[in-house]
Amino acid sequence: MAAESRRPGKTGSAGAPSRLRVLTGDAPTPAPSFRLLTQVSAALSTSLDLDATLREVLEKLNTLVAFDAASLFLRDASGKELQVKAALGVPVALAEVKRFKVGEGVVGWVVQHGSTALIANSSKDARYKETVAGRRPQTVLAAPLRARHQVFGALVLVRAAQEPFTGDHQRLVEAIAGQAAVAIDHARLFETERASRRRAEALLLMAQSCSEAVSTPELLERAVKQVAFAMGATAAVIVQPDSRGRVVESVCEWAPARTLDWEAWRGQPVDAHPLGRALRDATAPFLIQPGTSSLVPESVFSQIECAVVAAVPIRWQGEAVAALLVGFRGPLVPDEAAVELLDELGSQIALGLERLRLQGQVQEQRNEIAVVAERNRIARDLHDGIVQYVYALGLNLEHGLDLVGQDQEGTAAALRRAIEQTNHVLSEMRTFIYQLRPIIMKEKEVGQWVLDLCRQFQLATGVTVEASVGPTGGHELSPEISIALFRIIQEALSNIY
């Protein structure tokens, strides 16, 4: 193949300055191009970033072969369509041709057959699919990208038909395509591995967040932060209905709730909102874009600076327990892998909510058992203590009654004993009531009950007790922790005296 150089002032078929390099004459050797091929191979083998590798392929190719435009097509996830992943030159651009079906057009034919297509004049080849009306005939060179015995894309070069590609061009481009295919395959494998690692990390962090939460609001707060971080979202929202279908929790991350008006959902029936009804009935995630659905007002998209909202129903054993809404910036919408990850994150949230629900049931059962045990203890203490004193008091009063009118001194002594017994009963009752404080602890904060307990202990025993309670800082202890703390201090004082 002869060496090539730019022709000054040349314009492409669309009237724009051309990247075409034309043959200068009888150059004796193709060695310069193939030496560059070795350099291109070395350059491509050093990159593991897919987008950078695709750009590098076209830029390095332009140092070897003259063309007006070049593009790289790769199969999509379904394997049935080819998408433009990189383009260079005029008039081809990403916005002009985005995808072909396998078997459609020159690029589709190349991928389907795994063979290079060398077209001298596009107007005379049935495989060529015209994308812009009135375009001048072109010469096309398209080579398959093959790795591990599979064709996963194509490299396409285009230039004006008066300077057709030759067999030398074909051999050189096929060599470049082979090197590029290996580099692209390595980059794709690296991207897949990195995506898998990120996916595993996101699921692990979500599982940890959900397992560490001790309440539903805390779980939702942790979960929405993890979703926004893992997905790189502009906004994330979780809403949770109660058993009556009313929204009881609404947690938002990376966008003010008052702007999105999610707080207005609190207390409102899920059926009152089109999006709520859609999420209630949905069994799989779905995407919402501006102008395509009335589920989300278009103003919301601009407020949270997103081009698409992913709606994820969160279900447990077929029942809707919550919903996740995630906003993404454009221009690319979340791919299938991202939607699957959101669905799995939703499953983690559902599992966390179920764990808290079961823990709540277990705690309720424990509380009921504790109440029964406390009632039994109260009955036993009353019978063994206060009831006996009251019974003795009654006997003394009966004895005093028998002595009335017969033995004045005996009557007075009986009444004095009755008064002493009454005071003792009152003292026992006060002590007993303080032992029951946890049952009625809602009247005051636990700190105040501790101070009262220490004061009562000091009055009863004469032992000096110094107790101080600092400010709560807005953090309230759960009833279980408050009762446990009170019991510990109560037991400690009992051990002193």
Image (cartoon, rainbow, N blue to C red):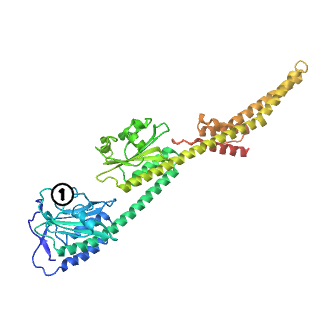
Q: Quadrant of residue 137?
A: bottom left
Asked whether, in this view, residue 271 is left or right of residue 401, the answer is: left
Residue 423 seen: yes
SS of the residue at dot 1?
Answer: loop
Crowding at dot 1, Cα within 10 Å, few <14 / some 14-19 / many 20+, comes out as few
As drawn, 38 above or below 295: below
The residue closer to the viewer here, 129 or 349, is 129
Quarter of the image with the N terminus is bottom left
Q: Quadrant of residue 30?
A: bottom left
| Residue 271, image x, y percentages | 41, 36
Q: Amino acid at mark 1?
A: Thr
| Residue 409, image x, y percentages | 89, 23
As drawn, 6 above or below 463: below
Q: Residue at x 31, y 64 (%)?
A: 50
Q: Give the residue pinned by disc 1.
A: 131
Numbered-mark total: 1
As drawn, 52 above or below 345: below
The residue closer to the viewer here, 130 or 7, is 130
Tell which residue pokes out farthest to the right in this image. Answer: 406
